[in-house]
Image: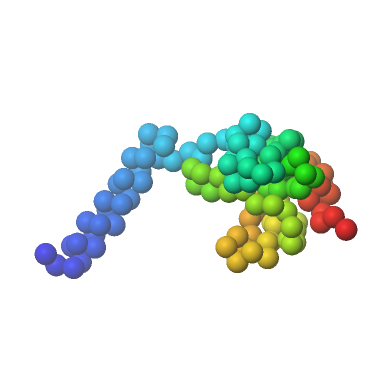
């Protein structure tokens, strides 16, 4: 089989599967409510359970406060969640939200989309302590 034909079949097959999944509604990222965000945090950091959660308006991320006073961020990454404590980070305001840059090479940054109405409150809450 010629390489050109094989390439067309592979690319076409991947595109077809992607289209079918999207049309069936299986490509939507599920919302992240407060209970799910707390459960995601507790799954990653069971020694410091979450006691308070503030989800974003679009339900893609949440700000966590823990029993020991630690702050953290939980966000959707595909169909799964990622939880990261807020220590050694920098925030940058963007036109569509806030970008949190961690000093961890495994988690370099995350963009939290926020409407202008809640961006200032989140930025104040995310400001590094001390």
Where does the image place residue 15, in percent across and percent down from the top left? 32, 50
Residue 94, compared with residue 19, is above or below; it is: below
Q: Residue at x 65, y 52 (%)?
A: 84
Residue at image position (80%, 45%) is 69
Question: Does residue 96 lie above or below 109 as drawn?
Answer: above
The quadrant of the image that shows the N terminus is bottom left
- Please provide percent x and percent y for residue 2: 14, 67
Query: Would residue 2 be found to the left or right of residue 111 on screen?
Result: left
Name the quarter where the C terminus is drawn.
bottom right
Q: Is 58 located above or below residue 8 in the figure?
A: above
* Residue at far right of view: 130
Q: Position of residue 91 (x, y in %)?
A: 75, 58
**How many labels, in total?**
0
| In the foreground, 104 or 122 | 104
Q: Is residue 113 visible?
A: no
Residue 92 or residue 65, whichever sits in front: 65
Q: Image point 76% across, 48% down: which residue? A: 70
Kindly tell me whether residue 72 is visible in this rendering: yes
Q: Give left or right: position of 39 versus 55.
A: left
Rendered image quadrant of residue 108 = bottom right
Q: Nearer the viewer, residue 127 or 66?
A: 66
Q: Residue furthest front?
A: 47
Residue at the far left: name it. 1
């Amino acid at each position: 089989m010629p390489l050109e034909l094989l390439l067309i079949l592979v690319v076409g097959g991947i595109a077809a599967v992607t289209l079918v999944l999207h049309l069936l509604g299986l490509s939507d990222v599920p919302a992240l409510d407060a209970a799910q965000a707390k459960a995601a945090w507790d799954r990653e950091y069971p020694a410091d359970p979450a006691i308070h959660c503030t989800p974003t308006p679009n339900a893609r991320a949440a700000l966590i406060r823990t029993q020991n006073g630690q702050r953290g961020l939980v966000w959707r990454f595909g169909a799964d969640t990622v939880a990261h404590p807020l220590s050694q980070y920098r925030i940058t305001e963007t036109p569509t939200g806030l970008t949190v840059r961690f000093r961890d090479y495994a988690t370099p940054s995350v963009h939290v989309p926020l409407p202008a109405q809640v961006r200032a409150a989140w930025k104040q809450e995310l400001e590094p302590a001390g």
